[in-house]
Amino acid sequence: MENSAEDYRIQSFDLDTQRLLKTALKDPSLVNLEKVSNIIVDQSLKDPVFSKEAGRICYTIVQAEAKQSNGNVFRRHLLNRLQQEFKEREEMRARSLQEWVCYVTFICNIFDYLKVNNMPMVALVHPVYDCLMRLAKPDALMNEDEVDCLVVQLHRIGEQLEKADNQRMNDLFFLLRDGFLLQEGLSSMARLLLLEILEFRAGGWMLSSTAHKQWCVSLLTW
Amino acid sequence: MLFVNGTFRHESSHTFGPSRWSHCRKRGINGSLRSNGEADDIDRGRNGHTDSSYKHPDRRHPSFTTPESTGSVSRCGRQADWGSQVEDDEMRRDVHRDMQRYRRRILGAEFTQRERRASSGSCDSREGDNMETDEAVLLRRQKQINYGKNTLAYDRYIKEVPKHMRQPGVHPKTPNKFRKYSRRSWDQQIKLWKVKLHAWDPPAEEGQDKTLDVVEELNLDDVMDIELDFPTITDSQNTQTSLPIHSLSVEVSGTEPNIA
């Protein structure tokens, strides 16, 4: 089975790096997996397009390594690097909103793709919640990019997160509801996005077809 | 983040006492040796959910030997880094899955036994009732097994000798983590298993000397033969390398060896 470069969105890398990544996908023992994990993380923090689907390439490398040598080197480095960045997320956010948004997108993507025995990685549940809670704070709600990131991630992994820890999802949604109702200075788009996610969860992480039609209309008349 | 009774619990909201593993740890979470008799303290008073290092005073089991790993990883208590947490989580799930499979296999075997009205001479009969199910024990045993399996010797062994060609006593057999054994008995089985696996080490210059070193290191003079009920080596056509320490291998039953 040939997965072309487009599947993993590695066109943004220079040719040497692309070659390295392709080798990592087929034959992990031939490459320095720590270096590969750093390359992927670094790019995910810079490139919004890459960060949205970087989980897939990570998943493939993890599987390839496990199959080839029963090893976990790549996964371990990847997770520990994520943890490092997580510890300094507040500084990251102050330094660059785009990097912060990319980080949240990336860690949620990893949570989505990298499962352990088909279950989400327990170690990531709280950190992901911490990130989303940060996005739900008043200062973050003022930035459309952060609100956008928040609702996109909740659409993708909200249901899984809720199953992993229902109480924290409740806590998160208290913040979102408060933000929607009380926060002054919220842009109309931000309010719309928040309302949509509130309804989405209330509907069991699905939009009924009528609700879906209503939303399509709202967005068209935007 | 802990998986307890079917739900994920935030670490500061758990309701049980000291970590099950903490009494076995000779070192604290930061790697330094613990002094004898310090009580276990669970309330770490941490702020974040995922902040790392914290002081974790602990009782120490005096003669516990810390197994070595590839990197400089603290093997005590709960690991703070995500890589280790995920690995531990994965091992826990694997152990639970293994347990279910084993139970099914045993129950299947018992059922067939009763059908044929065979005598209950086989070790596997009635084993379902006497199975090791303590998660802490199973995890520890699984870790020990993993150390042994994560070697070149083991890789070479399984390639050379497929399972159906294995002969008891001659070929190393992975100890069964689901059987009830005392701690000493289990640790000894693991040691002997790993020593046997050394026979498949990649060729070194002086293979013989190396094995003798291993023998001395383990002080196998203390080990007594309990039961030797396997075919002698001359009967087999398939033994590859002769095992210099074959005469010291022990078939361990459920009881403690008597040291004369």
Image (cartoon, rainbow, N blue to C red):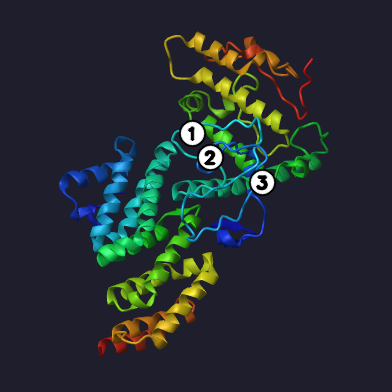
- The amino acid type, in three-letter code, at marker 1 is Ser
Left of A34 or right of it: where is A181?
right
Which residue is at the front of the view, A58 or B155? A58
Compute the Cα span from label 1 to label 3. Answer: 27 Å
User: Disc 1 or disc 2, which is closer to the eye?
Assistant: 2
Compute the Cα span from label 1 to label 2. Answer: 9 Å
x%, y% of residue B217?
58, 16
- The amino acid type, in three-letter code, at marker 2 is Arg
User: Where's the C terminus of chain A, which quadrant?
Assistant: bottom left
Pointer 2 indicates a residue of which chain?
A: B
**Numbered badge on residue B121:** none
Q: Secondary structure at mark 2?
A: loop
The reply to whether callout 1 and callout 2 are in contact (CB within 8 Å) is yes
x%, y% of residue B167?
62, 22
Q: Secondary structure at mark 3?
A: loop
Residue on which the image places disc 1: B69
Q: Is residue A188 above or below residue B106?
A: below
Disc 3 crowd rating (10 Å Cα; few below 14, some 14-19, many 20+) is: few
Circles 2 and 3 on the same subunit = yes
Left of A109 or right of it: where is A19?
left
Residue on which the image places disc 2: B75
Sequence-wise, the earlier of marks 1 and 3 is 3
How many numbered callouts? Answer: 3
Sequence-wise, the earlier of marks 2 and 3 is 3
